[in-house]
Amino acid sequence: MSSMGRGRSGQGDRLDPARPYHEQILGRLLEAIQGGELPVGARLPSERELAERFGVSRMTGRRALQELVELGLAERQVGRGSFVVQVKVRQQLQGLTSFTEDMRALGMRPSSRVLDVARRLPDAEAQRLLGLRRGEPVLYLKRLRLADGRPMALEINHLPLVRLPGLESLPREALEGSLYELFGSRWDRRPASATQTLEADLAGPEEARLLEVRPGAPILRITRLSRDQDGIPLEFVRSYYPGDRYRFQAELRRPAGEGGSGRGDGGRGG
């Protein structure tokens, strides 16, 4: 690093004694990352180097680096130091939102690339979950979802045509946006609940090519069954997310009336 470099403290490295030192050092590191001076993969200065650079204790330097880790912008590697990592999208598991809504909430520009769209008979799992009779078709829709032009998810949707009349006659570009918004505006059927499952997986050749990761890289495989306000299934989707671009977060609470002593847990995590 140049301005954040590993030299000794100088005129430009003075800190304001009226503000917490670790916050100011964190700010300098953030500026260097956002400005491209510290790109993804770059080694960050050690706590000792920060202490020497800014004339603070090593504990202060350690705290600044730890907060950078907690922000998801850096990771510690044992024996090697701390390194800048690709920012991960933090997605809450509470609430039913679409990809488009999630990316807009993060200040990113969502878009889609339609890879395949066809009228098909669903596979056994999709037929069962959607509650379709034998022979009832779905619109098979494969899309690559992007945020600010970067691949973020590969989605394979199964949409029951019997419940969405006219869907297959829509132009291809109508399928590039939010399906949830389309369901509401065209059929007045708004997804109100969903069942979602997350599983770890490895990228196959197609997922690796489309998501721009290496074959065998860790990915998240997510299935979701969305239902309308009457509880009728509207969509079954299988999605594949690059593991290095997402962090899923959930708020967990103990059931009402259960104590917090932790006894009798049968070895389950604490």
Image: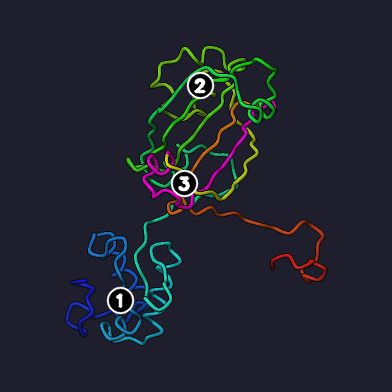
Name the secondary structure under disc 2.
helix
Name the secondary structure under disc 3.
loop
Rendered image: mark on residue 203: 3
Q: Which residues are magenta?
A: 206-230
Rendered image: mark on residue 34: none
**Disc nearer the start of the sequence (3/1):** 1
Image quarter hosting the C terminus: bottom right
Whole-number angstrom distance, CA of label 2 to CA of label 3: 35 Å
Query: Residue 230 versus residue 218: which sits nearer the camera?
Result: 218
Check disc 1 and give the amino acid type. Pro
Residue 205 falls in which quadrant of the image? top left
Colour mapping used in the image = rainbow
**Residue under the point 26% across and 65% down:** 38
Query: Residue 58 versus residue 76: which sits nearer the camera?
Result: 76
In this rendering, would 145 be left or right of 126?
left
**Residue under the point 64% across and 36% down:** 194
Name the secondary structure under disc 1.
loop
- Which of labels 3 and 1 is toward the front? 3
User: What crowding class fits label 1: few (fewer than 14 Cα within 10 Å), some (14-19), or many (20 or more)?
Assistant: many
Q: Which residue is mark 2?
A: 185
Check disc 2 and give the amino acid type. Ser
Q: Is residue 247 above or below residue 25?
A: above
- Would residue 213 be counted in the magenta stretch? yes
- Which of labels 1 and 2 is toward the front? 1
Residue 96 is situated, as x and y percent measured from the top left of the image, at 58, 39
